[in-house]
Amino acid sequence: MKSTQFILCLDIDGTLIDRDKHLHPMDAGILGQIPKEIQLILTTGRTLPSAKSILHEKGLFTESPFVLPGVFMNGGIAYLPGEVVCVQHPFSPITRETLIELAKAFPQTGFIFFSQTSGYILNNTPFAEHIVSIHHLNARASRISDIPDQIIKVEVLDSDPHLLHKIQLQTESLLVQCAYSLPYAYEINPSGITKAKTLHTLLNAMGLIELPIIVAGDAENDLALFEIGDISYAPSTALPAIRDRADHIVYVEKEGLLTPILQQLQLC
C-alpha cells in the first residue's frame, strides 16, 4: 500500500463499458496491468456478482475471490479485497414495505429488490426482463413472499420516462436516496446512502483515507463522488448535466477512458 499515490473510483456502466457493452481495447490492457501507484476501486450501482459477471465476460479480474475492493449498489454495500464485506446499508423494515406497496401500485413497471447477492423482480415486464438479461443483473422473477428482509437497493426499470417521473414523485416523501443510473433506470437506496459516503468508510478501513481521489462516472449516482473527488472525469457520452459537473471530458472512442487519466496523472 505504501506505493499507492492515487485512488481511482471507476464506474462500470456507461463509463468503463459503454451502453453497447463495448470495452475499449486500451482500457482492457491497462486493467490487466494497473500501475502500482493506483488503487482501483469499483464504484457501481451493480451488485458484486453482477459486476464480476460483466467483467469476467471481458476477461478481466477472473481470480476468485474477487481481488478488487469496491462500492456496490450505489453505496449500499462495500467490499474489501477478497469479497470481504466492509459495510452494508439495508432499508428499514418500514421503508422496505413501503417500496413493495409502490411496486404494487405500478404493475406495468419493473421493480428489482436487491439483497447482498441477488435481485428479486416484481412486475417482470418484457422491458425489465430484457434489461436484466443484457446487463447481467443477476435477478429473477419473484413473488412478494420471496423478497428477503435485508434489501439494500431497489431499481425501477421502464422505457417510459413519464412513468418513471411519476414513481420519482412518489418517492420524494420517503426517507430514501434516489438517482438515475441510466435514462430508464431509477435507483433507490436508504436515505443518505451514496457512493461517496460508503467510499469514505471503505478507504478508512483500508488505511487510504488521505490519498487524492480520482473519479470517473457518467450518471447522477456518480455526482456525490464528483463532489468529494480531487479530479473528476466523465465520458463524452454522459448527459450534459453530468459533463458540466466533471473537471475533464474524455472522448473514449479515441484512446479509451483510462489512458487520458493516467497521462494527466503522469503515470504513462
Image (cartoon, rainbow, N blue to C red):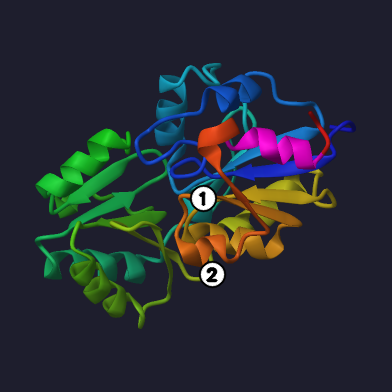
Residue under the image location 81 percent in, 44 percent down: 207
Camera-nearest label, 2 or 1: 1
Prevailing SS of the magenta stretch: helix
Q: Residue furthest bottom?
A: 173
Give 57 or 20, whichever is nearer the viewer.
Answer: 20
Residue 257 covered by magenta stretch: yes
Query: What residue is shown with label 1?
Result: 236
How packed mark 1 is, by other alpha carbons closer than 10 Å (few <14, some 14-19, many 20 or more), is some
Residue 29 covered by magenta stretch: no
Q: Disc 1 residue type?
A: Ser
Does residue 226 appear in this view? yes
Secondary structure at numbered mark 1: loop
Q: Position of residue 218 (x, y in %)?
A: 50, 53
Which quadrant of the rendered structure holds the N terminus? Answer: top right
Q: Quadrant of residue 153?
A: bottom left
Does residue 66 appear in this view? no
Which quadrant of the rendered structure holds the C terminus? Answer: top right
Residue under the image location 85 percent in, 39 percent down: 5
Query: What residue is shown with label 2?
Result: 192
Q: Which mark is residue 129?
A: none
Q: Disc 2 residue type?
A: Gly
Q: Residue furthest right?
A: 2
Give whichever of discs 2 and 1 has the lower sequence position.
2
Magenta span? 256-265
Mark 2–mark 1 CB contact (< 8 Å): no
Secondary structure at numbered mark 2: loop
Horizontal arrangement in the rendering, residue 33 relative to residue 63 (left or right): right
Residue under the image location 42 percent in, 32 percent down: 49
Q: Position of residue 22 (x, y in %)?
A: 41, 30
**Alpha-carbon distance for marks 2 and 1?**
29 Å
Q: Quadrant of residue 99?
A: bottom left
